[in-house]
Every structure is written in structure tokens, then in C-alpha cells.
Amino acid sequence: MNQRMISVTILGKTREYPYGTSYGEIVEEYKDSTRYPIVLVIKDGKLCELHKKLKKDGVLEFITTGDEIGHQTYKRSASLLLLKAIYHVAGHKNIKKVTLHYSVDAGYYYTIDGNVEITEAFLAQVKTYMLELAEKKIPIRKRSVGTNEAIEIFHEHGMYDKEKLFRFRRVSRVNIYSLDGFEDYFYGFMVNHTGYLKHFELYPYDNGLVLQLPTQANPSEVPPFCPRPKIFRIQKESERWGETMQADTVGALNEQIVKKGASQLLLIAEALQESKISQIARTIAENKDKKFVMIAGPSSSGKTTFSHRLSIQLSAHGLRPHPIAVDNYFVNRPDTPLDENGNYNFECLEAIDVKQFNEDMVRLLKGEEVELPYFNFKTGQREYRGDYLKLGKEDVLVIEGIHCLNDKLSSSLPTESKFKIYISALTQLNIDEHNRIPTTDGRLIRRIVRDARTRGASAKQTIAMWNSVRRGEEENIFPYQESADVMFNSALIYELAVLKLYAEPLLFSIEPGEPEYNEAKRLLKFLDYFLGIPGESIPSNSILREFIGGGCFDV
């Protein structure tokens, strides 16, 4: 009997393969056709792992470690490899819990609770074993079990965060990955075998270790480890807040909502943020030379609401704050630089009239009266509408813009006159002990909700432009974050449970086959971990109101 053949279009050419051929076998034939290793495929618009088998005609596309999805798959798989090695080298009996906390530089920060000392010698053993496994190309296997069985499995493994997580899962089955007998659950796909996982480094850091990994821009090389101590401290502080509220994982958050309701959790989270803003205002007020409060942060960090709340706190400390948006110093539209695609590049420093900004700020510092500009985004022209300002003894400017931490923007101003604030939404939550919530996911969901409300933009449009937004952040914001005098975490421990109710209908509008569908599907799966919280009881001055609406500030 003849074997049934399947027609597949790959890289513009149609080939035939026997029914049941794995995607991994097909990829092996094309391994030299891509610059970086192929780790996943898209079959007729659906993302698939390489162990899946060919069953019908269609189009096959390759995802490499140079793509965003492939890069995340590599990092996730490397985490599994590290966990397997840590338990092997240290011995299961000596480990109570290994926790992946958050990103540090290009890698992940972990701690080990147990009878284990994290030394250079210990990490050398772990690395050696990881490389041995990579050389052997051991398959990473996947199996589906009932949710109740998954709860029992992870209870036996001592992975109690996962046990708690699955108690609130509405799906009937759970996918479990295993590597040479080590079982774990991961939010997202894995590479086919350990042979892909050759690029990594291990470093002892703080009370734990860092698994340093390649960047998406250069997936075959591990960059030098460059810790950023200020952002690390604010991450640790935020994590302590989550632990204090007994809501450091999604399962723990859901448990709090079920047992105690969301009201107290919500009030504590808001109070912690208000206390932090008050501390920042007090620091500024105590430094009389500080006349320019410079605020910068990535997209959807809540900069505008934060600026308003900080201004209120500055007023309460006896100062007179005046908000200034750097965007009002945009060059006129014909003078705006173009990017590599010929589109206006509004995010580069050259899009700002830096000379005029400095002249105005220097005159204000000298006590002169200055007419401030207004940028008309409809006409693309800077206008003057009689907005005059003169600084007195108690006056302070609260300046918001993506370049505010870059001294090139304010090069004419004396350093002692500037107070720099970096703001970002650094979520305190992990899904469980081995699955973190990327900061970018929280900000993307915020932006999807806000763009739909304020700009009439679809989730499809927001997702389509997100990579471009992130590239701008990598170039213009993140390199300067460590120069900040203080950092503020705008993430709220409860916010994803609220945003879920607003974001899900928007994400469901993206149809299968559309380029943004796989990302929408991933975000929907992620939001499904959370029990929803209605937004009615959120304070009108909350940073979250900037995204869901109903706030007391004009944002």
C-alpha cells in the first residue's frame, strides 16, 4: 500500500513528505537555510513545536532564535536545562525550592532555598553538566495530563506554587515538559532537544545566581554580564511588597481574592505606591537646588498619572510644581528625521529641538520669564499661545519625556539642578516559581486597553507596532535608566486581574490567520491564569486609571 504524501510549501517551493513526518525532520533538511537555528514552525498560521507531525497540505514557515518568539523559546528551554542541572548537582534532598525571580541584564536571576551554597565551584559543576546534556541532544518531551493529576504531580515534586496555580485553572488538561526524568510546567513552547542550548553563562549574584543568555539581536553569542544595581534593588523591593501581601505568584493572588476579596489587597497596593511617591517628593523638597524633575520610562509605565500624583505630593511639601511635556519641543514636521523605512522617527533625540529646550530652561533657571511652546500634533507645527512662566523660589518644573534621563537633552543645565526619575511597570508577580511574568507583557496589555479606549486602536494595531515601540525603548530609554536618582515601580500587584476583563474582548477580535493571532492567543492564555477583579473600586487617582479610564486626571 502506497504511503500517503503531503504537499508543503516551504520558502516559496512546494515539497512532498510522507504523512506523519515530524516538523523536526523537515527542519533538519533546512538547517543551513537560516542564519540561526530553527526552533519552532508556523503551519498555516498556527505555531507548532518540532515534535508535531505533518498531517495535511499547507504552508510551513520557520521561527528561529533570531525571532522574538524563538528567542523566548530558547530562554525558557535554557531555564529548564538549568533547573535540571541544579537539582542534579545539588541533589533533590538538599533543595526546598528554586525560584526564578526576574530579568537581570540579558538573563534571569534565581535563588535556591536549601542546603546549597552558590559558589563559583558549584556553578562550574552546574555549567559542565548543562553542556554535557546539550552535547547529548536529549529530547525535551511533552505530555498532557488532567489538571487534578498535575496538582498531585507537583505536590509530590514540592512545587507548591504550581499546585496552587492549577487549583484555579479552568482547563481540564495541562501540558508537562520533561527532560531526562525532570518534570516541570512552563508557560510557552520549548525547543525540541537540548542540542539547541549551547549558549549561556552562569554568574553568582547577590543572594543567588544569574543565567546569562544571548540577546535576540545576536542569538549565538552571550554578552558580558553587566548588572544594573539600581533597577535590581527596585525589583527586590517590589518583590518584598508582593511577599508582604502574600501575593507573590498568580496562584497566591487568586487565593487572596477568593478568601479575602480584592478590596484590602487593592488598598494596600495603592497605599504602598502613594507612600513611595511621597518619599520621592520629600527628597526633592529637601534638596533646594533641584528645579528640574526629569521623568522618563518606557511605554505604558503610567508616566502621566505619576507626574500628576508627584506634583500633588510636591505641593503638599510646600513646592509649586509646573508640568512640562518635552513633546511640546518637537521640531516641526518637515524637519522630523526619518527611520530606515522612510517613516517619521518621533522617538530619536533629533526629533526634539534640543537647542530651544535648553535655551528656555536656562532662562527659567536664571529667573527670566519664558513663553513655553505647544506642539500641535494635527498640523505638525510648534505654536505659542501665551503660556508664560517665571520660576520663583518654591517653583519646580516636572518634565516628562522619553529622553529625560539622557543628559544630551538638558546639557546646558547644571547637574545639581536636575532630579532624575525612572519609572517602569515591574510586575511583582510570577506565574509560579519557574515562570516569570515579563515586564513587557504587563505593559503591552496596559497599552492594548488604553489604545482601544483613547485612540480607537484595535488590539491588532497595538500588537503590530509593539516591536517598533520596544526598539525605541532599547535605544532611547533603557541605556540611561541607571543614571536616575530614584526609580519608581508603577506596577500594581492586582492590576492584571483587572486588565483581564478589559483586554480579553479586544484580543478575541483578532482572527486566526492574521499575523498578530499567535501573540493574541498567547496573551489570552496568560490572562486565563487570573481570576478577574472588577474595576469599579479602583481609586480615581490610581495609575491603573490611565489605562482603564475613569480617573481624576486628564489623561
Image: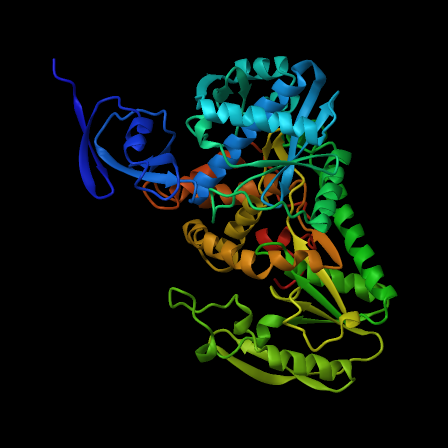
**Image position of 311 with respect to 153: above or below:** below
**Image position of 287 with respect to 474: above or below:** below
428 or 486, nearer to the observer: 486
Give the number of marks. Answer: 0
128 or 504, nearer to the observer: 128
Q: Is residue 246 left or right of residue 190?
A: right
The residue located at (38%, 29%) in the rendering is 49
Asked if residue 137 shows in the view, the reply is yes
**Image position of 135 with respect to 107: above or below:** above
Q: Quadrant of the C terminus?
A: bottom right
Q: Quadrant of the N terminus?
A: top left
The residue located at (71%, 41%) in the rendering is 266
Quarter assignment of residue 479: bottom right
37 or 439, nearer to the observer: 37
**Image position of 359 with respect to 144: above or below:** below
Residue 107: image x %, image y %? 59, 40
480 or 267, nearer to the observer: 480
Asked if residue 379 shows in the view, the reply is no
Residue 25: image x %, image y %? 30, 27
Quarter assignment of residue 236: top right
Q: Is residue 319 left or right of residue 353?
A: right
Residue 155: image x %, image y %? 63, 15
